[in-house]
Amino acid sequence: MTTQKKHVVGITDHMFGAPDLEAEVLGDDVEIDFFATIDETLFSPERLARLDALMVWGARLGPKSIAHLSRCRGVVRYGGHPPQSRFGRALIIGWPTSSRMIGVLKGIERKFGPSRVRL
């Protein structure tokens, strides 16, 4: 039996491989749309428009991408390399931070330790 997907979470890119940890933490009822690129020009407007939330690792988001996030309720930047914000820092663009996204960050904190996460 397959679990019906209730939410769509986009992940722009990842340090290496598929975003397996994020998928595990988000759960079976979440469809992950993995863009697998940091090149904002390759983000499809149609894919962005169907997202409930977006997790950003190394990509830069500009007004062009943000304009297509019509359904999106939260954007979280996570990752720890410059010039990005600290691990787990939410981007402030007018959306409330999703409790589901906080759950992802807490799952990452449990796996890698509290020194890697700033909520």
Image: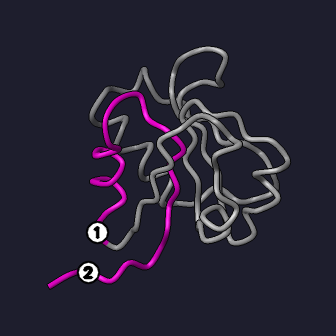
Secondary structure category for the residue under label 1: loop
Q: Would residue 100 be found to the left or right of residue 2 on screen?
A: right
Check if residue 92 falls in the magenta segment: no
Q: Which of 12 and 92 is in front in this view?
A: 12
Viewer-proximal residue, 23 or 33? 33
Residue occupying the point 43% across, 23% down: 116
The label on residue 3 is 2
- Residue at 31% from the left image edge and 27% from the top image edge: 112
Image location of residue 2, percent across then percent down: 20, 81
Is disc 2 in contact with disc 1, using a CB cutoff of under 8 Å?
Answer: yes
Task: Give residue 28's mark.
Answer: 1
Q: Indicate the position of residue 66 as horizontal and vertical percent values.
A: 78, 53
| Amino acid of disc 1 | Asp
Left/right of residue 28 with respect to residue 57 in the rendered view:
left
Crowd around label 2: few <14 · some 14–19 · many ≥20 (10 Å): few
Residue 23 magenta-drawn?
yes
The magenta-colored residue range is 1-28
Please state, as top left, top right, bottom left or bottom right, where the C terminus lies in the image: top right
Task: Work out which quarter of the rendered image holds the N terminus and state it.
Answer: bottom left
